[in-house]
Amino acid sequence: MADIRELWKNSERSDPPELQFRQAIIDAGLQPPSEVILDGKIHRFNSGSKGRHGFGDKSGWYVGYSDGIPAGRFGDWRWGVEHNFVADIGRKLTAREEMEFARHLDEARKVREAVEKKMRENVADVVDKIWSESAEANADHPYLVKKRIDPNGARVTGDGRLIVPLFNADGEMTTLQYIDASGGKLYHTGGKTGGSYWRIGDNEDSHIYIAEGFATAATIAQVTDKACYVAYSASNIPTVTGLLRDRYGPSKRIIIVADNDANGVGKNYADQASAKFGATVIIPPVDGMDANDYLLAGNDLSALLEPPEQTFDWLLDGNDFRNSPAPISWLIKGWMQNNSLMMVHGPSGSGKTFLMLDWCLRLAAVDMENRDWCGHRTKQTPVAYLAGEGHHGLRGRIAAWLQHHSVDSIQMWISKSGTDLNTNEGLVKVIENIRALPVQPKVIVVDTLHRFLLGDENSAQDAKTMLDSCAVLMEEFDCTVILVHHTGVSEEAQHRARGSSAWRGALDIEVSVKPGNSDRPIEIVQRKMKDAEMQQSKFFDLKPVTINGWRDEDDQLVSSVVLDPANEPIRENKKSSKVAEFRKRFERAWHASHRERDSKGRPFVDRNAMMDFLTGPFIGMSESAAKKALQKDPSRMIGCLIDGEIVVPFGNGWSATDAAMILDLESQCR
């Protein structure tokens, strides 16, 4: 071990590997041996399990190696726990040392498996012999009398201790539990308890129970006349539940009856099993009691374990569901649905606030003669507009819209400022102020999301808190909530909202505003419509409106703008444009290749000549890009021309077949 000592002498660690190994055993919740020997052999020790599980034999084990980086494995055979160990040498392991560590672990595993296999085989034979030679227990056994339970097939040893068996999933007996008259419990030395259990009772028709101890399980089986499985410990409940779920499938109802321990251990393991495998958890409502204690204290255990039959109406019959019409309630037909979550997004300056005001003011207008929006029927309804910024400009925009549409009165309320809507304080502030309004709004606008969100819009967790607040508002006021948000900065992000993908997933309706320019009007695009058909885009220009009676500090008239419907622009046929571009390239390549012709007299360009042209000074493609351009994929140059019936493959190149192009080329040769 001189190499190890030298290693420790030169490292930052002061504690030798043996002490580290011993501490690792302590950290795993086991009582360590007084001395750890790193000799590659398996060593057994009393793991201190007696206080926890009722046995005191040497079920703990470890295997340690001292060559290279000290490492090994340790665990407890009784409960099937196992841990790896590698010494901390004050620095990160090298790749070679990592390989050495892995080799040590594999060697330790093989040593442990060989010893365990031999030990388990011996124990299985011994406990089977003890069980078969033991007499059946009588009902007058002191422990059974104390717990007021039947023997249920338990047996007794020659010295009068009760014996109950443990079986694995294959039905093989793995060990025995011995229970004395006062309730003290011991397991047979060397047997395996983890993953083992015992069934009391045969009735498994509707549901089955799982309990920790023998007396508890026997009590449950007697009270319910249903089968109850003994897991023998709280920590073994998740494993047993998983085994039974695998055996019986998802349709079997499994009920775990956990002990009401002061430290909550029983509930903790029962909840783990329930979450992972799907099971009902029942716990006696009195601290410190298990099901047997609860019954002996005079309580109605039957009522606790088998409550009155419930009425299940969560799932509806499909025929009745179909025959109950539930048409969509629209606020703006095809665009804004009642009691829904919407988002309107667009880049800064795109006109999204103008769109929101156009929608909201139409809804809120009391005396508007024709409130339809672009031919879509619109209902009159109150609106709460939570504005987080730009209040000065907002006043002018509202005034301009009301003047332009000859509207005198609206049922619309605007917030003075933003607030953190995804906090309890902010949400309560919004709810209380809306409740105080003379009428309850059917639309609540949050403009913009950034001004009302505490946290990071890229965080799914922060997004969830805001979405939860929106759900509360929708539930409280039976209204639609509209979030106004920005798009990303990059070109490819202009069609989606900025931040977490959780936003879009939660939406019923998503609308984006594409900014206009000198050649194109503003475009309103539906990106998502959950329960109805998608609508065609709408187009608008911004129309200036001089606000009557408004003047600035220089006595100049004040103006704003409103959305004004525009015609859909004529869209260029991108495919035709691409075909025209590629056709022109083919013509130029033909001239550059000395105007070759095929055997039929058609203009022809050889592959090599086309490569020279594309990579030459006129086009300047790289060789790899030019090769892609010659592929038959319709998105590539040659593939596009073939798909458009402009050229056809011929020999080691392509011949022109389009009559118009051939005439052009012929005329250019004259």
Image: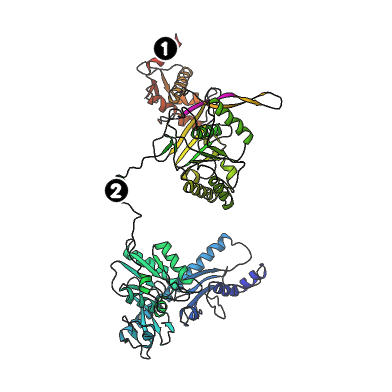
- Residue 493, image x and y in percent? 53, 37
Secondary structure category for the residue under label 2 = helix
Dot placed on the residue nearer the N-terminal end, 2 or 1: 2
Q: Which residue is mark 2?
A: 320
Q: Residues within 10 Å of mark 1 (few under 14, many from 20)?
A: few
- Residue 637, image x and y in percent? 44, 27
Q: Residue 119 lies in what quarter of the image?
A: bottom left
Alpha-carbon span between mark 2 and mark 1: 74 Å
| Foreground disc of the pair 2, 1 | 2
Q: Which residues are magenta?
A: 536-545
- Image position of 610 with respect to 511: above or below: above
Q: Which residue is mark 1?
A: 666
Secondary structure category for the residue under label 1 = helix
Judging depth in this view, the residue of 224 and 55 nearest the camera is: 224
Judging depth in this view, the residue of 488 and 446 nearest the camera is: 446
Q: Residues within 10 Å of mark 2 (few under 14, many from 20)?
A: few
